[in-house]
Image: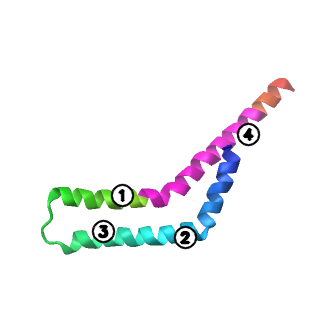
């Protein structure tokens, strides 16, 4: 998929009802994991690391469209700059 088309797809994804639902569910899961860590008086270190990892993974999922958008915008800008440079060289 070309960067401009991928950028349009990311925009459509973020506006979709499905993505809105996913973000709602993931935010709830993040909160639930944090509450579990706060409620248990004694947790094994492995369980603490697991809960922290689950929170981190959920946050990364929520940030993915934003991160992809930034990368794609950079690719589009780079492609435009290359095209302009090529036009200058040939013109």
65 vs 29, left or right, is right
Q: Main secondary structure of the magenta part?
A: helix
Q: Give the range drawn in magenta.
A: 60-83
Q: Which of marks 3 and 1 is nearer the N terminus?
A: 3
In x, y percent, where is residue 26? 43, 67
Are there few (<14), some (14-19), or many (20+) residues within 10 Å of tag 4? few
Q: Which of marks 3 and 4 is nearer the N terminus?
A: 3
Q: How far apart are marks 4 and 2 (CA)?
A: 32 Å
Q: Distance between the residues labelled 3 and 1?
A: 10 Å
Going by the picture, which residue comes out furthest to the right?
Answer: 91
Are there few (<14), some (14-19), or many (20+) residues within 10 Å of tag 1? few
In-front residue for pair 31/84? 31
The label on residue 33 is 3
Q: Earlier in the sequence, mark 4 or mark 2?
A: 2
The label on residue 80 is 4
Q: Mark 2 points at which residue?
A: 20
Magenta-colored stretch includes residue 78: yes
10 vs 30, left or right, is right
Given this view, does label 2 or label 1 mark the residue nearer the observer?
A: 2
Q: Mark 1 points at which residue?
A: 56
Are there few (<14), some (14-19), or many (20+) residues within 10 Å of tag 2? few
Q: What number of labels is visible? A: 4
The label on residue 90 is none
Q: Give the answer, above or below, for where 82 lies relative to 57.
A: above
């Amino acid at each position: 998929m070309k960067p401009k088309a991928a950028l349009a797809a990311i925009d459509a994804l973020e506006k979709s009802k499905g993505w809105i639902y996913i973000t709602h569910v993931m935010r709830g899961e993040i909160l639930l994991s944090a509450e579990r860590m706060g409620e248990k008086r004694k947790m094994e270190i492995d369980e603490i690391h697991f809960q922290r990892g689950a929170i981190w993974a959920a946050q990364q999922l929520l940030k993915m469209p934003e991160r992809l958008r930034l990368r794609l915008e950079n690719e589009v800008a780079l492609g435009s700059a290359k095209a302009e440079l090529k036009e200058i060289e040939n013109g």
